[in-house]
Amino acid sequence: MRVVMKFGGTSVGSADAIRQVAAIVKESRQNHEVVVVVSAMNAPDLRTTDTLIAAAHAAAQGEGDATAHVAPRLLDLHMRAAAELAPPDACAALETEIRTMLDYLSDLSRSIAVLGELTPRALDLFSGLGERLNARLIAAALRAAGVPAEAIDATELIITDDRYGAASPIMDETTARSRKRLLPLLEAGVVPVVTGFIGATRTGVPTTLGRGGSDYSCSILGACLDANEVWFWKEVDGVLTANPKVVPEARSLRVLSYSEMAELAYYGANVLHPKTVLPLVQRNIPIRIRNTFNPSHPGTLIGEGRGDRTARAVTAIKEVSMITVGGPGMLGLAGVAARIFIAVARAKANILLISQASSEQSVCFAVPLAEAPAAVAELRKELENEFSAHDVEHIDVKDSVMIIAVVGSGMRGTPGIAGQVFGAMGEAKINVIAIAQGSTENNISLVVSAADGDEAVRAIHRSFAL
Ligand SMILES: Nc1ncnc2c1ncn2[C@@H]1O[C@H](COP(=O)(O)OP(=O)(O)O)[C@@H](O)[C@H]1O
Ligand SMILES: N[C@@H](CC(=O)OP(=O)(O)O)C(=O)O
């Protein structure tokens, strides 16, 4: 069986963790063809991607060489791990490669400081470096563990559009490139260790797929290589009924349907990047989510099918703003909803949830907190005439709210779910600001104040005995 497997930043955050990764790959390889996708190292005291992004912004603020403090720490992080995992000659070769890449970053940092401007294109060069460093380290660790392995930058494989920071793959070209480059390696018994998170445009300019995008890289490659299964190795025992950091008693779900996973990911269960499911569902490739640090646990299997319980899991999106547009003249004002949403789209704000009162006197919707100011500015411009005519009287913004979603495909057609959610909120004395049900009826989502968010998740988890 061919398996494309991804190890996230925490799963490769230290020499011990990487030793564990090498053991998993070595064992998997006995029965399967394996392609490995890796994220940047996420050590407890050094989160590589965050650090690189902060350095890029510091450069734009005019700090001559913003990598001066960062580069030695990154070199040290990777070389300390390497020293524990690989022989001295391999470490020396790795150090030369890492130094070259960090020198390039330092040159780039100086150029950004001179220009005083950080373009999304330059930011992608910075933010994607951690994966490049780490793929080389992991490949060296695998070789030292007796597994033939080769580090490969996904800029060679994943061809994307030029939406820097949130690029999308061009699947036919990516398929051709990745098959041409990776299949001969698999045939030769070599494990390709591919950088997650990054790709490149047709003309070879590096891009990134969005924060947390290594999951997506893995599913893109899984689809392109016709993998039999795609595995995601995490620090948790699969997908749990809630974020264990909020609900410590959350339990692991043995199976989930693609649509349940897609909804959970969309509604903030950051166990998987929201775009991950799509390339795989189209080809019906099963997904497993497993624990790097507890590999004997079966984890979660995601595939076709319908859940048999009503609600499966509860999740939350933080840092959300709720925008309400209202006024007496909105009743029957033709096309106003369309104009509202087109204005929000112009502001490039992503609408997470919509709720409209049946009286049509107001429309409210939720967008990410950071995107709210631009959305409101566009709305004010769009509705200028309606404001003058007093058809629209207010655009209210409520910051510091959270969206809570209850997800489960068995909820479809099951009466009383919304009542149970409201009951749980009432019992916990939590005020519900808005409620919406997805058209798939796979979820019910509600908006509560951020201060109540974690308690709302716990109350729903208790109420549905998840
Ligand atoms: N419903 C959920 N099930 C499992 N993990 C969840 C859920 N919601 C949020 N999480 C969080 O997602 C994280 C996923 O694991 P992690 O190893 O950090 O992923 P990666 O490093 O690949 O991004 C966990 O730390 C966990 O706290
Ligand atoms: N390193 C990138 C990509 C990624 O997916 O990382 P992780 O697998 O650790 O979430 C980020 O932090 O966004």
Image (spheres, rainbow, N blue to C red):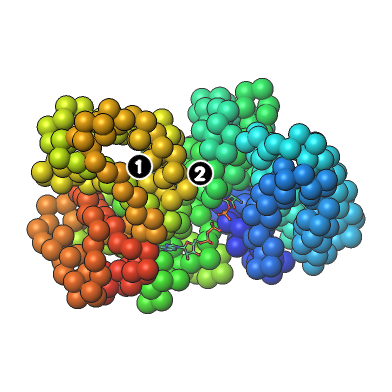
Q: Quadrant of the C terminus?
A: bottom left
Identify the residue shown where x is 83% and y is 47%. 65
**Mark closer to the chain start, 2 or 1:** 2
Query: Does residue 153 appear in the picture of this structure?
Result: no
Cα–Cα gap, marks 2 and 1:
21 Å
Where does the image place residue 246, in percent across and percent down from the top left? 41, 71
- Crowding at mark 2 (Cα within 10 Å: few <14, some 14-19, many 20+): many
Of 411 and 184, the residue lying toward us: 411
Of 445 and 247, the residue lying toward us: 445
SS assignment at label 2 = helix
Residue positioned most to the top = 203
Q: Is residue 160 left or right of residue 341?
A: right
How many marks can you see?
2
- Crowding at mark 1 (Cα within 10 Å: few <14, some 14-19, many 20+): some
Query: Does residue 410 appear in the picture of this structure?
Result: yes
Where does the image place residue 131, in percent across and percent down from the top left? 67, 48
The residue at which mark 1 appears reads as 351
Of 7 and 392, the residue lying toward us: 392
Decide: is 399 above or below 4.
below
Identify the residue shown where x is 41% and y is 66%. 243
Q: Is residue 357 left or right of residue 219?
A: left
Identify the residue shown where x is 81% and y is 57%. 69
Indicate yes or no: mark 2 CB to ligand 2 under 8 Å. yes
- What kind of residue is marked 2? Tyr
Q: Is residue 367 left or right of residue 90?
A: left
Q: Is residue 28 left or right of residue 453?
A: right
Where does the image place residue 91, in percent across and percent down from the top left? 85, 57
- What kind of residue is marked 1? Ile
The residue at which mark 2 appears reads as 216
